[in-house]
Structures are given as C-alpha cells and as structure tokens.
Amino acid sequence: MGCLTLLLSLYVVSQDRPATVNEDVFPAERAVLSARNEIQSGSAVIQSVHYRDQGDGLKIQSRASYSIWFSDDKIRTDHKTWSADDASNDGALVLDQRAAQVGSIARIFDTDPMEPARRVASSEFKLTDPKVLDQTTKLIYDIRKAGMSPKPFSILYSQTPKDFVGSWAGLRLQPTITEKHDERGKVTTIAFRTQPGLAYEMDIGMDCGPNLLRGVIVQGTTKYSLSCEISEFPSARPAGKRWFPKSIIYLAEDNGNAWEKNEVTISEASFDQEIPNKTFDWDGLGTPPGTLIIQRSPNERSFKIYDGKGLQPFKPARADLGNHKPVYASRSAFLFWRIGIGCALIAIVFLFLSASRWRGALAKS
C-alpha cells in the first residue's frame, strides 16, 4: 500500500505547449490542464504593471502592454514597454516589438521607439538551433499559460509553467485535498510538501473553467503567491463563453515584506474563433515595404528585402542609380562645395590683406 501511495505521488514535468495532461496529477489539476488544452485559437489584450522594492518600498519599475493572437501552431505577440517615472507614473516608451512564430519559423519586427519613422532591420529565424529557439520564444507569449505559475507575466513565455498546476516534478509529501462551496462554486484545495522543503497550496475553481484561483509556495521565510479573478469571455464554441483569468496578481515576499509585485489585467479576450493566417506574416506584423530582413539559420545568414508582397534578394546600392541618388552622395557633394567656397573666400581675404600691406610698404618708401 505504501508503494502504491508513493507511485501515485509522482509528478512528471511536461514540456509541451500549452500543457500536456499527465495521468499522475490530481483530478482538479488535470481538469485545469484539459480546459487550457481545449483552447486552440484566440486573441487577448493585456496590461501589466511591474513593481520592485529598491530599498524604499514597492515602486513601479515598468508598464507593458501585450496584444496576442494564436491559432494551432501559430502565435504572435505585440509587446510595448514603458519605463517608470516615479513623479508622474508616465514613463517613456522603451520597447516596441512584434514577434510571430509559425511552426519552425519565427519573425521579429522591431521599431525604434525614439524615432518611429526610422527603419530597423528585422529578423527571420529557423528554430532548429536550440539556442535560437530559447532566445526567440522569450519574445512570444502564450496567453494560455496566464494564471498558472507564480511568475511576473514578462517572463512567462512559451514554456510549460513550473511550480503550479501539473508541472512540479518529484514526490508529493503529505498531500491533502479538500473541497468546499462558496460564491465561486465548487473549490478544490490541494496542499502538499516537497523534498527540498517547499510547501505548496492551491485553490482551483471547478465551476469556473476550471481555473487556478490562488496558489502559494513557501520556503522558509520566502513566499511566492498568485491570485486570479476569473471571468467569462466571448467564445465561438457552442457555449458562447469561456472562463479565463481577468486579473492576475503575483507577489514575492520575504519575512512578510513584499519585494516584487506584478499586476496583470486582461482587458480584452476572445477564444475559439478563426484567426486569419496573414496575422502572422510580415504584412500582418505591419512591416513597411523596403524593410531589410535578416534571415538566420544555424549555419548561414542571408539578407532580403520585403517588397510588400514577399521577400526578395537584397541588392546593395550602386553608384549608377540615375536620378535616384543615395542621400549620402548628395550630402557629401554639397559638403565639398561648401568647403571649396570657404577656402576660396579665405584665399581672397588673404590676398586682399597682403595687397594692403604691400601698398602701405610702398607708400612709406
């Protein structure tokens, strides 16, 4: 009997996206994973405010917004971040980036927040190199993972969330499961400890999703917690709606003092509708014609130009461009003219002064 209990306590990590149901997890967690796996397409708009304690209490470190679309193996994230201004709480835009992944191809369109009209080279990656895959997926956020892991949203990118809901690998010691009913319906509370000395506790709302409502991890004096407010969002499925987190609060504390906080609000969301394929291509990303695209793969790099319809071979500028001369050429020529005119004026003044001195010398003699 003891061996059977030990086997039932095993936890297996899954690296699939958004999550893979494992038969060893408890039924309530399995229900949450199943509900998230059912969402095959959708879109969402998210606002995030990140706080940190730099020694004088929690202060706003940054604000960010995310617009996310996903459909099957395609996902796109438009990400903007503003720096914090403690005086006005209105910082400057420091990041404006759009990234999309279609199967094994990732596209990244960057802009310069300081000069929006300035063209910045964009990138297209083949995700066959593990290093490239790791770097690229940090730019693409899977909304289906929201409210499942005690982390700031800014680092909850496309990887299986750990620590909560069917992702912890190891033995569950002294697990307990209790059920109650309140205004949220049936709530299942799961609590257990792990070998490294971590204590886990989570509340799962069975009648609203199911979804994680609250989760806590405690180790010594350190505590990480996540709380979610659940709401119904439009869905194209027959039910017409789908339960999903409306707001998420992450909090990190030490000895009862908060040192990091993240407030996330999902202001818009809809699920299970068809997302046009063009949402994930260069045109959908808002790439203007003439943008330089750097194609990267593990063993090569090439340059292309986006012409508004597709990628064409990049041809370096030539000297014989007719009437369409490069800007730098006309500016250089104008500069040389100015230098020449300046030298001529200096020579004329020098000759005039020399002549005046020569006349004066003759007059004295």
Image: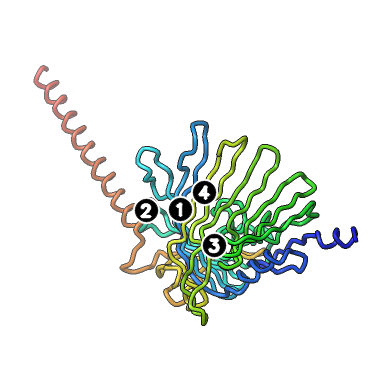
Q: Which amino acid does label 2 sit on?
A: Glu
SS under mark 2: loop
Q: Residue 115 carries which label?
A: 2
What residue do we see at 52% from left, 34% from top?
54
The nearer-to-camera label among 4 and 3 is 3
**Label 4, label 1: how many angstroms apart (C-alpha)?**
11 Å
Residue pointed to by mark 4: 262
Q: Do the residues labelled 2 and 1 touch (CB within 8 Å)?
A: no
Q: Earlier in the sequence, mark 2 or mark 1?
A: 1
Q: Which of marks 2 and 3 is nearer the N terminus?
A: 2
The nearer-to-camera label among 1 and 3 is 3
Residue pointed to by mark 1: 64
What residue do we see at 85% from left, 61% from top?
7
The image position of residue 131, as x and y in percent, is: 67, 58
**Label 1, label 3: how many angstroms apart (C-alpha)?**
30 Å
Q: Earlier in the sequence, mark 2 or mark 4?
A: 2
* Category of crowding for the residue at label 3, using alpha-carbon neighbours closer than 10 angstroms: few (below 14), some (14–19), many (at least 20): few
Q: Say if residue 165 shows up in the picture.
A: yes
